[in-house]
Image (spheres, helix red, strand yellow):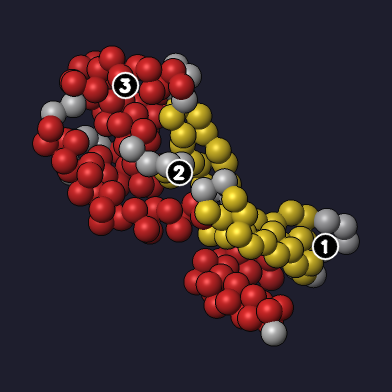
Amino acid sequence: METDLILYKLIILYMLEKVDFPLTNSSLTQFIIDEGYTNYFNVQQSISELIDQGLINTLLVRNTTQYLITTEGKETLSFFHNKLSDAIKHDIGEFFIKNKIEMRNEISIYADYVPEKDEEYTVNCFIKERTVTLFSVSINVLSEEHAKKICENWRSHSDDIYKYVSKQLLE
């Protein structure tokens, strides 16, 4: 069982090392489960142990946990990457080819809200490219319901809003 957990940890480290953006829990879990390597609970245990060992860091963005490999994680992977078969590395490469745009959008286009005073909320919406903010907008709304609705709709409308605002400002 411990040998299996080591394999799952190496898969996670390898995946995080191969991209230049954080991966979400769902992306990591989707690959490992869909490929039939293990179950959800073993993936979560592996992630938790990698965090405890300082091999990956977490970011929390609007109830979504994102993971980044640390320098120590890269070092560890460099020592043990040969424990991952070429078939596993190939499967990871294929997964990224099929899902990279969706995974990048998952972490690059997001919105969150914070309560202000008297039942008011500020909604902050972002479009990022790696570490650069391409576009952001903050909106004050009068209910948490409206704040949640804007956050839910931001991903599907962000491209149109960005194009509209840019066009208006450039005219």
SS for dot 2:
loop
Q: CA distance from mark 3 to mark 1?
A: 48 Å
- The image shows residue 96 at horizontal and vertical percentages of 28, 49
Graded by Cα atoms within 10 Å as few (under 14), some (14 to 19) or many (20 or more), the crowding at tag 3 reads: many
Residue 1 sits in quarter: top left
Amino acid type assigned to the residue bearing label 2 in the image: Phe
Q: Which mark is residue 10?
A: none
Q: CA distance from mark 2 to mark 3?
A: 18 Å
Earlier sequence position, callout 2 versus callout 3: 2
Q: Is residue 86 above or below residue 21?
A: above
Identify which residue, 146 or 133, lies in the foreground: 133
Q: Which residue is disc 1 drawn over? A: 119
Name the side, left or right, on which 21 lies relative to 44: right
Q: Which mark is residue 77?
A: 3
| Number of disc labels | 3
Earlier sequence position, callout 3 versus callout 1: 3
Q: Is residue 81 above or below residue 149?
A: above
Which residue is at 56% across, 70% downward? 158
SS for dot 1:
loop
Name the side, left or right, on which 37 lies relative to 113: left
Earlier sequence position, callout 1 versus callout 2: 2
In the rendered image, is residue 74 in sight? yes
Q: Is residue 3 above or below residue 43?
A: above
Q: Which residue is disc 2 drawn over? A: 21
